[in-house]
Amino acid sequence: MTMQRGKDILLKLEDPAGSSTFVSMAGLRARTISLNAKTVDTTNADSVGAWRELLPGSGVKSLSVSGSGVFTDTAADVAIRSVFFAQEARRWQLVIPAFGILDGVMQIAALEYAGDFDGEAVYSLTLASAGNISFTPI
């Protein structure tokens, strides 16, 4: 993967739900994508040299996405707010240039609004995977 600009990572929400039409949620200034896999420890008295042993393919995988920025249009603000208050698990896409697309059902785990008296209003959101996440290389 060659160097990429962070601003080129896109966060998209399927809108309306089930339509396979994705709308970019604009205005994110910072994004973090975390892929995790818990392990299942099967170490026992017969483990060679008392080294830890793991059971392949048995852990729980998860994806979390966090971002912060400014809403650049009312439609993005309304969509994210609506999904949060309904606590909907919706299909999202994360487009990472020259790497791939992560696609799957996620739920907004946190939504925060803030602002300094002499600056712009900002928001932060955290998404948590709520089902299978697929990866398509670009």
Image (cartoon, grey):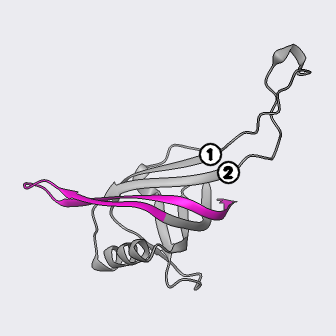
Q: Which residues are magenta?
A: 108-137
Q: Nearer the viewer, residue 137 or 3?
A: 137
Mark 1 vs mark 2: which is more N-terminal?
1
Instruction: Give, as a three-letter code, the residue at label 1.
Output: Asn
- Magenta-span inclusion, residue 129: yes
7 sits left or right of 63 in the view: left
Label ID, residue 36: 1
Element carrying mark 1: strand
134 sits left or right of 7 in the view: right
Q: Quadrant of residue 67?
A: bottom left
Could you say where residue 53 lies in the image, as x and y percent from the top left?
82, 29
- At a point 81% along the width and 46% down the height, the residue shown is 57
Instruction: Give, as a three-letter code, the residue at label 2.
Output: Lys
Please say if 85 is above or below 68: below
Is residue 98 at all visible to an observer of this figure? no
Q: Main secondary structure of the magenta part?
A: strand
Residue farthest to the top, as pictured: 49
Could you say where residue 87 lies in the image, as x and y percent from the top left?
46, 72
Please say if 62 is above or below 77: above
Q: Quadrant of residue 18?
A: bottom right
Mark 1–mark 2 Cα distance, whole angstroms, equals 6 Å
Q: Quadrant of residue 123?
A: bottom left
Q: Residue tagged by mark 2?
A: 61
